[in-house]
Image: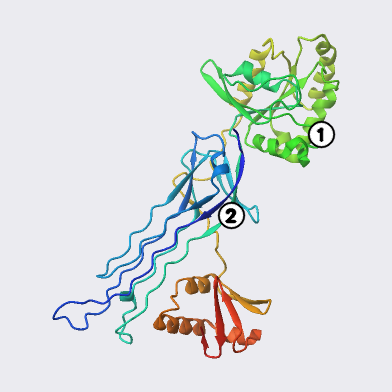
Amino acid sequence: MFYDTAKIFVKGGDGGNGCISFRREKYVPRGGPNGGDGGRGGDVVFVADEGLHTLVDFRYRAHFKAERGQHGRGSNMHGAGASDLIVRVPTGTVIKDAETEEILADLTDNGQRFIAAQGGRGGRGNARFLSNINRVPRLAEKGEPGQEGWLLLELKLLADVGLVGYPNAGKSTFLAACTAARPKIAGYPFTTLQPNLGVVKLDQESFVLADIPGLIEGAHKGAGLGQEFLRHLERTRVLIHVVDAAGTEGRDPVADYAQINTELALYDEQLAKLPQVVAANKMDLPEGEANLLRLEKAAAADGRRVFPISAITRHGLKEILYHVLDVISSLPIPEKTEELSEEVVYRLTEKEDGFNIRRQDGVFIIEGQELERLVAMTDFSQEQAVARFQRIITRMGVEKALVEAGAKAGSVVRIGRQELEYYPGFME
């Protein structure tokens, strides 16, 4: 089954917790702290794989969570970092933020990598908090939570040439006659409900040909799933416009030709500007000859060439395919936008520095990346950790900002997922 869209949830692994431990040996009084740090959580990494051709696997699994890092231990033993979670997707996959639909990555090359959610860093053990002021630190950090969020995956086929046209124009028959692909072929509209790929081999040359389901009027607005189908043409370099020259469906071939080009332009002007070759199909029928001259005149006005063919008898296929190959050879080689050696990194939860306070249903909500990370990594069951937290937020000006926002003793304050009660000089 062919699936070209998916919505998934990704979460980087949490960091391991730091350890509270003290050296305990005979004849070594007051040995000092030796709690190790936690390990880093694993990243969720997408890798483009040219051996995959559909997003069907994501239909049965929508959550991808990397493992957390190991906790620190005594004797200054640090926890091991977790392995990255590798998620393989077909080449041509576009990854978007599910909320904003912002494009985060476009994996067009085999092996290209994209870090979708970074793992959290490990919490520091109590050995890290040893100082001249605090000789017996009884605090350690919790591991930082990994990044998380919902993503949209969209697959756009990677093909050199795309077949466009009305339903039942003969596109699938054309594909089957030119390649080893075996799409479903029948005499009713929308027989083809999913894109099909085939490789056209001509002497020592070849190119990839994509057959997408037929388009109808209003396709650019989604009519007949037009937007879902048109997406697969965005990466093609040349279009073969298959027209039913015999008008077997009772339509006018010239009007069909004009309408399809209108839909292409309304969806994406770049599609309408692609080199286009017109295949006047079904010329084995008497009506084909009667409409050929009109179609050639309409195409010539757009600077396009018409090839009379019959996909079912294979008449004229060699001429049009060699012409398309010449067109492809004359086009410049697409430039690479990214070096494959570089990994794309997207921080799902990245926020600007500082913090802001807003009030909702009587609760003071404080937002800020640094502050939320501090809360997530503070163990509020440790007295020294709470005191450290209080010192930091006072230094950051959080308490002063709360008072200015109208907070009073007993007010509920939410930072990240933690709810605290505010009291002047102390928040617990």
| Left or right, residue 385 beside residue 223 | left
What is the secondary structure assignment of the residue under circle 2?
strand
Residue 311 versus residue 427 in the image, above or below: above
Quadrant housing the N terminus: top right
Q: Residue 276 is drawn in which quadrant?
A: top right
Residue ID at (65%, 35%) = 232
Residue 62 versus residue 408 in the image, above or below: above
Residue 65 versus residue 234 in the image, above or below: below
Q: Nearer the viewer, residue 283 or 332?
A: 283
Residue ID at (47%, 49%) = 45
Q: Nearer the viewer, residue 375 or 349?
A: 375
Residue ID at (52%, 72%) = 372
Residue 303's x, y, as percent? 76, 26
Residue 296's x, y, as percent? 80, 19
Amino acid type of the residue that numbered disc 2 sits on in the rendered structure? Trp
Callout 2: few (<14), some (14-19), or many (20+) C-alpha neighbours within 10 Å? some
First in sequence, mark 2 or 1: give its number.
2
| Left or right, residue 138 beside residue 360 | left
Amino acid type of the residue that numbered disc 1 sits on in the rendered structure? Glu
Callout 1: few (<14), some (14-19), or many (20+) C-alpha neighbours within 10 Å? some
Q: Write down the residue under mark 1.
A: 217
- Whether the residues at callouts 2 and 1 have beta carbons within 8 Å, the answer is no
Task: Estimate the spatial distance between the alpha carbons at disc 2 and disc 1, rounded to whole Å.
Answer: 33 Å
2 vs 1, front mark? 2
Q: Write down the residue under mark 2.
A: 150
